[in-house]
Image: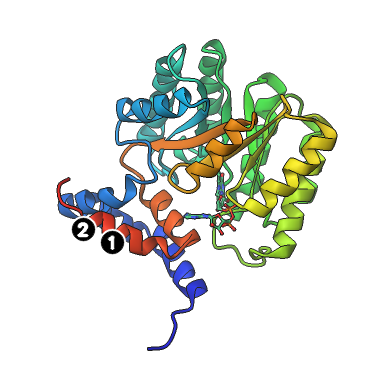
Amino acid sequence: MSRVDLNRVSSSLKKIAKDERLKSLFLGNEIMYTYLLKAAKRYIGGETVEDCFETAKVYNQSGIKVSIDYCGESITDQSQAISACLEFIRLADLMENNVEGSISLDLSHIGLCIDRDFAKNNLFRLLDRAKSCGLDVMISMEGADRTDDILELYTSANEIYDNAGITIQAYLERSLNDLKNIIDHCKNGKIRIVKGAYDEANSIPRGEALTERFILLCEQVIASQNKLSIATHDSEIIERLKEILRSTDPISAHTEFEMLRGVSDQMLSSLTDSGYDTRIYLIYGMQWHLYFWHRLAEHPQNVYQAIVDIGKQGL
Ligand code: FDA
């Protein structure tokens, strides 16, 4: 039998992730949902905020902070976007004095695909409440067709609020310039550097060039004294950045390592044990389709684990 090209598997899994018809089929059919959930549970914090808090507390007890996202994206219905915004506000209220962490969200979950001002209004409502609860809100970066809008909303939020942060994708060439603009014009906000999860034309592929770009972006944030989240599971990048941090900002109050649940939990624990600030990203809710398929796409061997999880007895 010929070997399967893992890049092609990964690309197909990303197409499944983005396919809205498959999303409706998988999430809308009770049996399908129940079985896929068995595999998704490895990566998600839970279906409800209560489940997610149980998961979060386990990490908190080991010294790891959390960032919690009520999962969902690409909402085109205004009432659904308002409901999502209210759920994020409820999350802020529930997290206060209960969970050590921050909130994370996709702006397309609270209206970016409907109208930019509508999304801005929802974002400001959330930032307002989160601020009064002592919480930061990290804005995720989505597909490249949304980058300009997301950066613009972040920049206007940053003029008023000091508790908003932004994610920058190293695989986009434009990110060097975007980061420079953020450093020059935005103060206080945390900057999270990721490789990038979407299937983008002309993006820098995984490999040496992307590793170097990721490290360069992190170095620029470190030099700017902005708060930095190094959001990767790549051990080479982590080791090199640890070295850089040793000479610039030893076990810094400005820098943390952040990872996705179920990917490299052991590596995150060992960073915590070595004294670094660490955070785990947890999603909750029922709209985990995109998130789950992206985790398989990033490491197609995870499909085998998913099959084992689905085949396990009990629900
Ligand atoms: P890479 O994919 O090269 O993986 C490095 C190594 O990590 C692999 O060799 C493997 O050992 C391990 N690994 C990675 N993924 C794995 C998996 N699913 N299962 C098992 N092992 C795995 N993206 C985006 O476009 N917008 C965003 O807003 C965010 N937000 C975000 C927040 C946080 C906290 C994190 C950690 C990541 C994101 N991402 C993201 C996702 C990010 O862009 C990227 O797709 C993943 O982090 C995987 O890339 P790595 O940097 O880990 O490198």
Q: Which mark is residue 288?
A: none
Please give the name of the residue rendered at 20% of the width and 54% of the height, measured from the top-left corner.
312
Colour convention of the picture: rainbow
| Image coords of residue 185 (percent x, y) | 80, 31
| Disc 2 residue type (three-letter) | Gly
Near mark 1 (Cα within 10 A), the count class, few <14, some 14-19 or many ≥20, is some
Q: Is mark 1 within 8 Å of ligand 1?
A: no
Say which mark, if any, is on residue 311.
2
Using the image, determine if residue 93 lies above or below residue 101: above
- Are the residues flagged by discs 1 and 2 in contact, CB closer than 8 Å? yes
Quadrant (top left, top right, bottom left, bottom right) of the C terminus: top left
The residue type indicated by label 1 comes to Ile
Position of 155 compared to 47: left or right?
right
Of 240 and 19, nearer the camera is 240
Relative to 188, say whether 13 is above or below.
below
Residue at the location (44% across, 65% down)?
300
Q: Position of residue 133 (x, y in %)?
A: 51, 12
Q: Is residue 115 visible?
A: no
Relative horizontal placement of residue 218, taking residue 22 as reference (left or right)? right
Q: Is residue 276 visible?
A: yes
Count the marks: 2
Q: Position of residue 6 (x, y in %)?
A: 48, 73
| Quadrant housing residue 2 | bottom left
Q: SS of the residue at dot 1?
A: helix
Relative vertical location of residue 48 with respect to residue 216 in this rendering, above or below: above
How many angstroms separate mark 1 from mark 2 (CA)?
A: 6 Å
The quarter in which the N terminus is drawn is bottom left
For label 1, the residue is 307
Relative image position of residue 23 (x, y in whole percent): 32, 55
